[in-house]
Amino acid sequence: MTNRKRLWYIFGPVILAFVLILILFTMPLGSHYSAKTEQRAAASLSPVIFKNQKIKQQALSDKNTRYVPFFGSSELRRFDNFHPSIMAARYHNYTPFLLGQRGAQSLPQFFNITTIEGQLKDKKAVYIISPQWFVKKGILPPAFKYYNGELADLTWLKKANPKSPYDRYVAKRLLQMIGNNGTVADNATKIAQGKPLSGWNKTVLNFRLTLLQHQDALFSGLQLDNNYDRFVKPKVDKLPAKYNEKQLHKMAIDKAAKDTDNNSFHVKNSFYTKNVKPHLKKLKNSQRHFNYNQSPEYGDLQVVLNQFKNNNTNVMFVIPPVNGRWEAYTGMDMQMYYRTVNKIKFQLQQQGFNNILDLSHDGNKPYFMEDTIHIGYAGWVKFDSATSKFIEQQQPQPHYRLSNQFLTQKWANLIPTQQNLNQFKVHELDK
């Protein structure tokens, strides 16, 4: 073998890899996704869409189709006939862009929001807050990592201000989730310590971010679950041609009665047979010690609120209920649950986030839920009635007044009583 061939076998793969990276780096980002791809992405609930940015940015900027971000978690995957995507396709002048599924709590939603800040500026959004997120340990690292992507991390780091208590908080939480190894962790450590990134840090960050943006533009459109064709499109024509809330509510009740007739909890038959019935005896009184009053989730929610405030996003917050029949069986302390709801609402309202749809007391209404904790059927009808009015009708400009006290451990660990909450009131001088 000649020396030239020997050298090629050694260095050739390295050279080819470098050339491929160079091509990827220099390709234009102007690729445009089709309207069909936008439509699929809006209902896909794909972690790829959640982590990245190109399709989200294009769809939410589309002037031909009005996409509105719906931030939430596992309830968004309950595609019954009255799901907001289906109702909007039939009746409304907007399309929900669904962002989140199981495990997508406030911290991953924060990073998701960093990738679409330009598209949230002076716009509307819907944000579903589940009290079940507010467990003692908050979101766990495996769930966070499932939704977290380096592109979103670097997008945030590029703008992170070490003097901001919000960015220092995010940096500390990010390190708790991903550990202390790697470029993102090294940069986050500096922000957490209140230190600025060096010129070299920023150069490496920008180089890596550009590569990821090109990768996102090239490949994200190929990894979409086609929930639109599977769940949305086939059900649109099953709804009446004209919107009538009373008629829709009756249809939802009738449909739910048929779908939940094998159990006394009014949960969907398939869910009961697969997830509940085999474990029914064990689940008796299994939720007696659940507590959502104290959680790092309150701080995570606060940094999300700061994102909305910085972008002047007008948000409707939805607090869903739990299935009353199921909670009676499992022994959940509903007074604890309502204290959690009150704490969440206090944090919102004290800072000017006043568009709140509180459904927490509706869990005992007939067929309001699809299963033990997820809204569905009649619940979706009420949800759609409120959110569609918020989106389609003109709303007053929000006036937000954030208070750093909601970032503190003192607030996260507070057991809410009226007396305790009073000490956290945002007074006029703080506004």
Image (cartoon, rainbow, N blue to C red):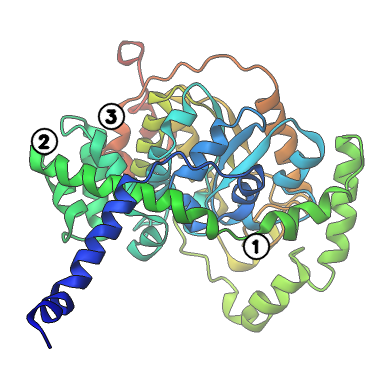
Q: Is residue 278 left or right of residue 10?
A: right
User: Label 2 crowding class (10 Å Cα cut-off): few <14, some 14-19, many 20+?
Assistant: some
Question: For mark 1, what is the residue?
Answer: 372
Numbered label attached to residue 404: 3
Vertical placement of residue 218 versus 273, above or below: above
The answer to which quarter of the image holds residue 418 is top left
In the foreground, 110 or 136:
110
Vertical placement of residue 215 versus 241, above or below: below
Label 3 vs label 2, nearer the camera: 2
The answer to which quarter of the image holds residue 408 is top left
Q: Upstream in the sequence, badge 2 or badge 1?
A: 2
Q: Is residue 54 left or right of residue 60?
A: left
The CA span between labels 2 and 1 is: 47 Å
Residue 109: horizontal and vertical position, in percent?
Answer: 43, 45
Q: Secondary structure at mark 3?
A: helix
In the foreground, 267 or 159:
159
Residue 197: horizontal and vertical position, in percent?
Answer: 12, 39
Query: Which quarter of the image is occupied by the C terminus?
Result: top left
Residue 201: horizontal and vertical position, in percent?
Answer: 12, 44
In the foreground, 210 or 193:
210
Task: Report the residue at 58% width, 14% height from top.
Answer: 396
Is residue 126 visible in this depiction of the protein?
no
Q: Say what amino acid the circle numbered 3 marks.
A: Asn
Q: Say what amino acid the circle numbered 1 marks.
A: Thr
Q: Upstream in the sequence, badge 3 or badge 1?
A: 1
Q: Say what amino acid the circle numbered 2 marks.
A: Pro
Query: Which quarter of the image is occupied by the N terminus?
Result: bottom left
Q: Upstream in the sequence, badge 3 or badge 2?
A: 2
Question: For mark 2, what is the residue?
Answer: 196
Task: Report the residue at 28% width, 31% height from top.
Answer: 405
User: Label 1 crowding class (10 Å Cα cut-off): few <14, some 14-19, many 20+?
Assistant: many
